[in-house]
Amino acid sequence: MSAHLREHKKRQTRQAISDTATRLFLDRGFEAVTIAEIAAAAQVAKMTVTNYFPRKEDLALDVHEVFVAGLARTVADREPGESALAALRREFLAALERRDALLGFSSPRFARMIADSPTLTARLRDLYEQREDALAQALTAEAAAPGDFTPRAVAALLAATHRALFQQVMELTAAGRDHKEIAAVVAESSRLAFDLLEPSLADYAVRARPS
Amino acid sequence: MSAHLREHKKRQTRQAISDTATRLFLDRGFEAVTIAEIAAAAQVAKMTVTNYFPRKEDLALDVHEVFVAGLARTVADREPGESALAALRREFLAALERRDALLGFSSPRFARMIADSPTLTARLRDLYEQREDALAQALTAEAAAPGDFTPRAVAALLAATHRALFQQVMELTAAGRDHKEIAAVVAESSRLAFDLLEPSLADYAVRARPS
DNA sequence: ACACATCTTTATGTCGAACATAAATTTGGG
DNA sequence: CCCAAATTTATGTTCGACATAAAGATGTGT
């Protein structure tokens, strides 16, 4: 029985490595910790660490899938009659209420760990871009006109807005503000940012009602 | 006389290294060329290469200053009565006419060199972000309301649009289209993208006329 | 129950970028 | 012509990324 035993153990090993790494990173900063140290602290071989996490950055930012797919999913799942902008705005506010980590909510130490590491900020930019690409693809899938630049332009605007808001959350977090205050400030920023886009995007990508 | 002799020789050395590196990169790809090879080909020591170009990426993308400052400068230099959006649009079209390298115009090989190298695309993202930050700062300097999120949101939109257009130029260049065709396609894309922003940004950051 | 095939972990080594230090060389000014 | 300063060179270390193969653990089929 339990063909999942091996898989379970794998998860355990992976989690142990990730936890150990995160602790070390928070204590001493991302760049200052070597993979060899992480392996030693987690009591595994160096190669085991790099097997699970091909790049060192993955040890600290282990959110690739869900982060990248977020915006595209929100747009793809929106209700008939709702525009892409409205869907993203609604979902952003909901995520803000729940202090979603994907909006940048974390601890001051974690936020500073990222801000202080060129490697991690670069990785974050990589994720931003992949997220924008996924969103552009979702919009293109609807738009149907081949070679139309509009979906890409719209995706760029929406992703850029999300990114600016994410960065504000990170900055406030690094500055030590508590989640409630951050949510209040960023709610206002998001109101402003989404209102700003309203005139341009209110009529774009409004999901058709089923005929 | 000529207190510039030393400086001149420095420029010469720097240029020789840069040229050698670019040639090697185009021939064999950015990642495949080592700094040791560049140094050997340019007949200097390895340390001389890294002295002039602290990071390997700088050998291929030696445009930091002018690229990062571009958008902010355009906004800062605009005429009274002109909005930030209008200024950037005007300048974009002018740069398009002159096939400006800062818009992404180059050779197919160069464009592919960048696209094929994770290191270089990451560096490019870094430049995008610095450019956006510079633009945000320029807008903030005018807006005057401290803590206002608007300048950042606007800078994000404008920079994102420029970035999307830049990427289209790069893609078409890598695909081997000639400059004239690229200019035509991207002119249409830019019309679309800037028109899209018009409803939202037409009235933002309109430079006051001197009283 | 046992042997086998497969997956996971470990061991070892190479490569190259980034960085540090200091010596050697070149250059321009006094 | 010599000195001070800048430039280039020489040497070495660290660490992430990658490749290979051996060793160990696990589940399956007979």
Image (cartoon, coloured by chain):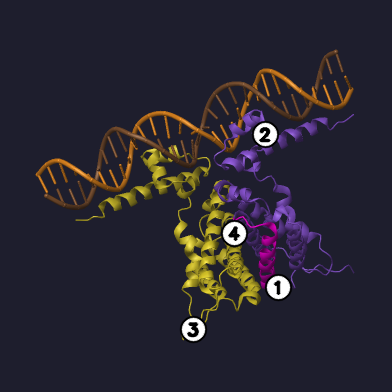
Chain colours: A yellow, B purple, C orange, D brown
Q: CA gap, disc 2 to disc 3?
A: 62 Å
- Please state, as top left, top right, bottom left or bottom right, where the N terminus of chain A lies in the image: bottom left
Specify start and end residues of the magenta stretch as a single range: B175-198
Residue under numbered circle 3:
A209
Q: CA gap, disc 3 to disc 1?
A: 28 Å
Q: Badge 2: how crowded within 10 Å, few (<14), some, or many (20+)?
A: few
Q: CA gap, disc 4 to disc 3?
A: 35 Å
Q: Amino acid at mark 1?
A: Glu
Residue under numbered circle 2:
B51
> Left or right: where does residue A24 sit relative to residue B55?
left
Task: Label 4: state its secondary structure.
Answer: helix
- Residue lying at 83% horizontally and 30% vertically, measured from the top left: B5
Q: Which mark is residue B198?
A: 1
Whether C1 is drawn above or below A161: the answer is above
Whether A200 is drawn above or below B84: the answer is below
Q: Amino acid at mark 2?
A: Asn
Q: Badge 4: how crowded within 10 Å, few (<14), some, or many (20+)?
A: some
Q: CA gap, disc 1 to disc 2?
A: 46 Å
